[in-house]
Each structure stands twice: as C-alpha cells, then as structure tokens.
Amino acid sequence: MTFASIGSLSARQAELLDTWLTGAEVVHDHGWGLVATTVLEVQRGSDHLIVKAGGERDGHITREITAHRNWLSPWTARGRAPLLVHCDVDAKLVVTRYLPGRLVLGDPSVDDPDTYRQAGELLAAFHGQESHVDPDHERLENDKALAWLDEPHRIDAAVEQRLRDEIASWPVPSATVVPTHGDWQPRNWLVADGVVSVIDFGRAALRPALTDFARLAAQDFRRDPALERAFLEGYGDDPRETGAWLRQQVREAIGTATWAYAVGDDDFEAQGLRMIDEALAPA
C-alpha cells in the first residue's frame, strides 16, 4: 500500500507518509466524517501508530503539534498520552504512537466516578504547568461568539438578540490562562485496565482553566452529580468563578449550537440550543 492511494490525503501528506512510514498498512480508519480530518491507525512492523492529517482549511493539526511539543510531558511521562513520532506543520500532518485502550464514551467506565477522579488529576497536572495573564482573552472570546451568531444557525431570533445584549453587557477583565485541552470529555479519554489516558489535542491552547470544565458540565456532570464530585476531588479545587463561568457557558452554548448546525450534527445542535436556554434562564 502507498499513502498516495488514500484520496483524503493531499499529495504532500501522502509523500511525507510514504517517506516516513514506508511499508505501513492501514489497520483502521478512525475519521468521523463531520470535519475534514483523516485519522488512520497504521501498522509498520512492530510500530503501531496513529496518523492525523488535516484538510485545506484545518486549524487543529497546528494546535495538536504545539501541544505535543510544549505541554504533553506531564501525561506522556506516565504513559497517559501518545508520544509524537513525526509532524509537519505546513502539511498539517502528525504521526504518534498508538495508545491502547477503549474510548470512555460508550464504555461502562463512562459512569464510573473513578474515571472522572483520574481525569481530574490528569487535568490538574496539565493546567499546573504554566500560567499567564491575558488582557485580551475575554474580549476576543466575546468577538468569536458574536461571529458565530453572524453565521447561519437555527437559534430563535429573539433568543439571538438576548444573547447579543447579554454579551454587550459583560465586563472584559484580564484572564489568567493555562494550557488547556479544549475538548475535555469522555470521547477524548481512553481506559485500559482501569487507567485513564488522553487523546486528541486539536483544540489545545492557552485559556482559563474553567474552560475545560464546560463540556463535562453540559453533559456528564448534569447526568450524574457524583461524577462532578469525583472530578473535583481529583482536580483539587473548582476554578469556576461565578461571573467568568456564566460568560463561558453562554459562549460555549453559542459555539455548540452554531458549529453543530454548520456540520449537520442535529443531536449536538439540540444540545447547544438546550445549553443556550439554560444559560439564559434566571438564576
């Protein structure tokens, strides 16, 4: 097999992979079809690897490479995240060691509080590496939320205006930012022999720590408060200051509803619309 025969790869990506991984065989295609990212599980002799290749408009692979180069050592040193093997920023291509395990999402471990305790411990180590004060974070995130509202969506017009008015009323204080995963939830955790590990760093960036709580709060913590208690036990504290947390919930809800509409994920869009209603509900 040559990688040039895989139609979702660019010519440059295929050329690099045929050089780096001569003789490799594709074991499984892990792409999920909603975004233009190719994810291949490959075998080359005794090497078991994952290939991730971004499409022309992809912005995730660069962040994935940044995370591997700068922030993953608290996890890779413990075998809790995949090791980088090859990468090329310009080609939007990354190759890592395969990390064994089952996705927590859809596995019985998704209901086990110990899964969330471990996830909290892992996240605390990640967040604790460095911190900086960013005077522009809140303003830029508000601008992104408003830009999402400018895109096609199915948010009710009156609700959209309430969201715009809400955002316009917010203060824009400086924020302390740390390395964040950006999509911290069971679909990006693996479990093997009871041990939780982490994958998928395409949204990694410097943000406030509380942003990595948003997707769990909208899904798993809402489903079972015992999971939230276990997560906080592992993490060690709760960074969700009231004002900043409300602003994050509103922005997360807007992003969920509008992104899901753009890619045609009806279930996720419904979750985003529900998140908007809950974020705007009186306290």
Image (spheres, helix red, strand yellow):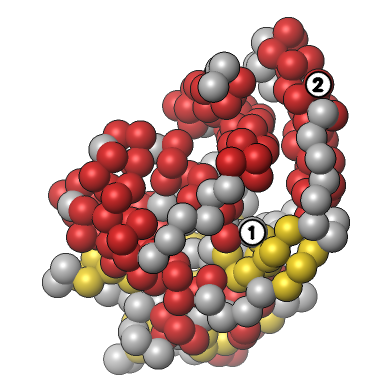
Which residue: 85% across, 56% down? 136
| Label placed on residue 208 | 1
- Disc number placed over residue 14 in the picture, else none: none
Instruction: Identify the residue at horizontal 75%, vertical 37% (top origin).
Output: 145
For mark 2, give the secondary structure.
Answer: helix
**Element assignment for label 1:** loop
* Above or below 204: residue 18: below
Quarter where residue 100 is shown: bottom left
Look at the image and tell me in which quarter the N terminus lies.
Answer: bottom left
Pointer 2 residue: 165
Q: Is residue 127 above or below residue 151?
A: below
50 left or right, relative to 68: left
x and y percentages locating residue 75 in the rendered image: 42, 80
The amino acid type of the residue labelled 2 equals Asp
Please tell me which residue is depicted at 41% across the width and 52% down the height of the picture. Answer: 185
Please say if 133 is above or below 188: below
Of the residues under marks 1 and 2, which one precedes in the sequence? 2
Nearer to me, 281 or 215: 281
Quote the CA–CA distance across marks 1 and 2.
23 Å
* Closest to the observer, 259 or 78: 78
Residue 256: which quarter of the image? top right
